[in-house]
Every structure is written in C-alpha cells, then in structure tokens.
Image: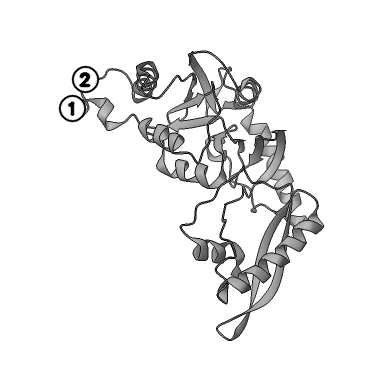
Amino acid sequence: MLDFYTLRQEISFGKEGGGTMKYYKYWAMGRNAIEMDGVRKEVSSLAGSNESTQDAERKAQEQIRQIGQKIHGDSHVFSEYQVPIKEELIREINPKAIITRNHYGSLILNAENMMIMDIDHPPISFLGLFGFGRKGTPKERIVQMIGEKIASGKYGELSARIYETFQGIRCIIHNAPCDPSSHEAEYLMRKFNNDPLYGFLCKKQQCFRARLTPKPHRCKFHRPPSKFPRFEPREIEEFNEWRTKYDELSRDYATCRFIKEIGSGRFFRELIDIHDEISGALSSRKLA
C-alpha cells in the first residue's frame, strides 16, 4: 500500500512552508484506490483536525482525492506545503505553544516564537588554532561562546537562559519573539553552531522544539511499542502500559540543568516556568 505522506513529500520536495505552527487534536486514517499508470492502487491517507475525528476522516479522503489530482498533472495541489506536527497533543499552553509526545515517547515543548537552541559542540572557530587556546570542558566552552556572542552586540540585544543537557548546552532566547522561518533565526542558529537539521525542521514545522523528559534508553527503557496515532485497541492498551512505566522511570532524571541567565526582560515567563518544571531544570537529578 502506498503511503500518502511519502507521496506528498516526493511530489512537493523543495517547496517552503509558511504561516503558523500546525498541529492537530484528532487524527484519522483513510484508505481508497486511485489510478496510477493505468493501475488502481490503494492509498492510505493520514489526516488531522482540531474539530473532530469525523472531520479528520473527511480530510483524509479529500487528501486521497488531491493526491490523485496531483499525479494526473494538477500543479496547484499542495503548493503551500507545510509539515504538521504528527505527534500526540498532550497540552495546549496557549495559541503559540503546545506540549506533544514524540516518536520515541519523550514530551516536547513546541514554541512558535520562543527561540530554543540545543548546542552539542562549540564552533571550530571558537576553539582556536588546532583546538588550543580555550580552557574548560566542551560544555564550558559552549557556555563561554554563548556569553561572548551575546555580549558582543553583533546579534542585537539578546537575553538568554543557559542550561546543561546530557549532550551539550541548551540556550533559550527569551527577551523577544522570533519567527523560526526568518533569515534572522537561520543566521543566529548558524552562528551559535546549532544543528542544521534542527533549523530545517524549525522552518518546516514553524516552531522551536525542546525535549522536556528523558529519552527512554537513558532510563534503561525501550521506546513505545507502536507509533502514533494509534487506532487499534490493543495498540492503545500496550501504549498506556508503556507510558505508566516510562512516567515512573523518568521521575528519577532531569532533561536539563539551569546554569545561568544572561540579560533581562523575560518575555516568555510562563513558557520558561513550564519548561523548567517539567524538565527538572532546577533539580539535582541525573541528566538523561
């Protein structure tokens, strides 16, 4: 069976999305047959809605009809392609911020305009010739790099909260909103040595993301036994059992640890408080 999302990504590759963060409360899987090269093939279509499951089912069938149109030459279908957040919606904080559960089971903060950067390595240029000239651990050098770049004023007036993560350093720019698809965001993430793939996903999903709970394997646990969305009763039951155990194990760990704050003017006070509480940033628990 052909998958709708695979077809759509192949056909629409290279088109930039735009607008606001896209997420859904309800999901449905539709199936129907379309003609491809003279042969009728069954296509599965996963669609989301914020109204109801029935509306999601209607959209799934509409997407199958549209993919048929696209295959037969309608160039206008999917011209405004944007990747939705295909994850379980856990909490709507406000219209521009939500918490979801990702594919391996961790809770994720999705913020439409609060810049979040997870930096695992300092830029090579910051290490000095042959890596010499800078003291401290890699994490300490990243913190030093962030402080120096903010203090330089080259990137505007920035305020930030700095956290240690399992792999590196998390930096939240909190004094002003930032559009994840803007050239400014792309430039800043590049200069701070943020992962390029993360920057690409920020642009496509129209939000910045931060993991709030541990990766399962760092709690000596496994990933969920099935993928979201789950429609079969057995899958739902198995996942609920998994979630209960994961929640129990993850209480012993923190996802990040607060180090310091640079600057003032905290614009996203509510989001930062939620981030710090769920991630265990102010605790002494082991990082995972």
Specify few, some or many for label 2: CA neighbours under 10 Å numbering under 14, 14-19, or 20 or more: few
The residue depicted at 70 percent of the width and 48 percent of the height is 24
Judging by the rendered image, the residue that carries numbered circle 2 is 133
Counting from the top left corner in percent of width and height, residue 218 is at: 52, 36
Snapshot quadrant of residue 143: top left
Observer-nearest of 128 and 164: 128
- Residue at the front extreme, as displayed: 76
Snapshot quadrant of residue 205: top right
Snapshot quadrant of residue 275: top right
The residue depicted at 18 percent of the width and 29 percent of the height is 130
Counting from the top left corner in percent of width and height, residue 177 is at: 56, 28
Specify few, some or many for label 1: CA neighbours under 10 Å numbering under 14, 14-19, or 20 or more: few
**Circle 2 sits in a helix, a strand or a loop, which is it?**
loop
| Distance between the alpha carbons at the discs numbered 2 and 1 | 7 Å
Q: Amino acid at mark 1?
A: Leu
Q: Is residue 40 above or below residue 261?
A: below
Q: Amino acid at mark 2?
A: Gly
Judging by the rendered image, the residue that carries numbered circle 1 is 129
Regarding residue 1, the answer to whether it shows in the image is: no
Q: Is residue 145 left or right of residue 228?
A: left
The residue depicted at 55 percent of the width and 75 percent of the height is 73
- Residue at the bottom extreme, as displayed: 38
Regarding residue 89, the answer to whether it shows in the image is: yes
Q: Is residue 271 above or below residue 219?
A: above
**Circle 1 sits in a helix, a strand or a loop, which is it?**
helix
Counting from the top left corner in percent of width and height, residue 125 is at: 25, 29
Observer-nearest of 159 and 249: 159
Q: Are marks 2 and 1 in contact (CB under 8 Å)?
A: yes
Q: Is residue 188 left or right of residue 19?
A: left
